[in-house]
């Protein structure tokens, strides 16, 4: 049986009505809502066909129908095809201060939750295979050295290193030149044992300090591989009767608190072959078990120099998909504008 234009229009009318009301939709409602000028009897026949094809289901013995996951999937694909679904990239955005980046992401996730009335998450941007850009050693006092480590994306981290001998400024300068001439542009995987041994030999009596600096570089790079996730609006789940059941809601909120499954979701989004645009998981499509009764919309964003993160919105299957997609696009445009203003300033 073919899903012709008339069936599509009736299906979309059922979905939109159900998203607005949360109640099963009958043929009489559709006859008033749609612009098809069809009788209730004709619409009933079409709804019967749609049910047979698996796009709608009858939850009770009443005449009303609700969309199935298959119906939602068709509706979402229709939206994605008819609109500009590409999330606006954050072009050339480089934030050197971690606190500023954290504040921005916390604001982003709150704005999303407020604008959509759904649960939201944003992961901090991360780089796979981070590479070292620069090391700067500076004396703090007679027993401590400050190592300022910059990696790809202009992310800067500081590490205090204890030293057993006092270093003069000339020695610190020589060690800086040695480290940067050998290590700049390398990932931690590319810094091999032979290279470390050579650096130690060239550093002479300061070989232990060289080893400590390389350990600090490895720690910084590995810490940047860990996904940091900011969330907001988890209690919005209680707004929707189909999700407010104590067991379901508790499971979803626990997922937001523990974050491990959210980390898996972020990693899956970033590893997707497309790696750009919007992904929509409906019901059983969700990679998170606790969210099998939800819809999950994720988008990959980029913060210049290959730094990528994920934005996610979680709500009921009758989610207002058009508003969610529009909000994501508007948000990225606003952030892009903020960044451009920073560059001009």
Image (cartoon, grey):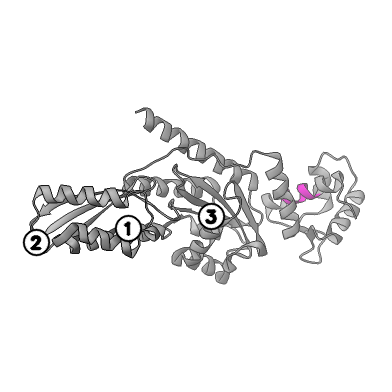
Task: Residue 11: give x, y in percent of width and height.
Answer: 79, 50
Magenta part, dominant SS: helix
- Which region of the structure is painted magenta? 11-17
Observer-side mark, 2 or 3, equals 2
Alpha carbons under labels 3 and 1: distance apart: 21 Å
Q: Earlier in the sequence, mark 1 or mark 2?
A: 2
Residue under numbered circle 2: 165
Residue 70 in the magenta stretch? The answer is: no
> Of helix, strand and loop, which one carries label 1?
helix
The label on residue 33 is none
Residue 313 as seen in the image, left or right of residue 47: left
Asked whether, in this view, residue 311 is left or right of residue 294, the answer is left
Check disc 3: other Cα within 10 Å, few if <14, some if 14-19, many if 20+.
Answer: many
In 3D space, how far apart are the residues under numbered discs 1 and 2 (Cα atoms)? 24 Å
Q: What label sits on residue 220 in the rendered view?
A: 1
Q: CA distance from mark 2 to mark 3?
A: 45 Å
Which of these two is toward me, 216 or 172? 172
Q: Residue at x 44, y 38 (%)?
A: 92
Q: Judge whether residue 162 can be spotted in this image.
A: no
Asked if the stretch drawn in magenta spans residue 12, the answer is yes
Residue 174 in percent (x, y) is at 17, 49
Q: Residue at x 72, y 59 (%)?
A: 69
Q: Residue at x 90, y 45 (%)?
A: 39
- Tag 3 residue: 270
Q: Are marks 3 and 1 in contact (CB under 8 Å)?
A: no
């Amino acid at each position: 049986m073919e899903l012709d234009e008339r069936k599509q229009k009736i299906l979309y009318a059922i979905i939109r009505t159900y998203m607005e009301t949360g109640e099963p939709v009958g043929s009489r409602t559709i006859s008033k809502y749609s612009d098809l000028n069809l009788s209730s009897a004709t619409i009933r026949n079409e709804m019967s066909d749609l049910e047979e094809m698996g796009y709608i289901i009858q939850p009770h013995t009443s005449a009303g129908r609700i969309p199935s996951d298959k119906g939602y999937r068709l509706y979402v694909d229709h939206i994605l095809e008819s609109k500009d679904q590409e999330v606006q990239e954050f072009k050339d955005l480089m934030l050197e201060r971690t606190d500023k980046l954290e504040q921005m992401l916390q604001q982003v996730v709150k704005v999303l939750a407020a604008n959509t009335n759904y649960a939201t998450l944003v992961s901090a941007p991360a780089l796979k295979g981070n590479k070292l850009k620069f090391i700067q050693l500076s004396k703090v006092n007679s027993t401590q050295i400050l190592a300022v480590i910059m990696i790809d994306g202009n992310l800067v981290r500081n590490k205090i290193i204890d030293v057993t001998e006092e270093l003069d400024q000339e020695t610190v300068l020589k060690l800086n030149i040695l480290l940067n001439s050998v290590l700049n542009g390398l990932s931690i995987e590319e810094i091999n044992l032979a290279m470390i041994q050579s650096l130690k030999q060239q550093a002479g009596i300061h070989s232990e300090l060289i080893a400590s600096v390389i350990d600090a570089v490895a720690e910084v790079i590995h810490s940047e591989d860990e996904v940091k996730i900011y969330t907001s609006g988890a209690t919005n789940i209680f707004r929707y009767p189909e999700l407010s059941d104590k067991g379901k809601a508790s499971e979803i909120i626990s997922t937001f608190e523990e974050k491990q499954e959210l980390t898996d979701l972020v990693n899956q989004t970033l590893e997707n072959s497309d790696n750009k645009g919007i992904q929509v998981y409906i019901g059983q499509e969700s990679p998170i078990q606790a969210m099998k009764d939800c819809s999950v919309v994720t988008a990959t964003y980029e913060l210049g120099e290959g730094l990528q993160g994920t934005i996610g919105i979680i709500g009921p299957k009758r989610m207002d998909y058009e508003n969610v997609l529009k909000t994501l696009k508007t948000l990225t445009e606003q952030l892009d504008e903020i960044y451009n203003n920073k560059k001009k300033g």
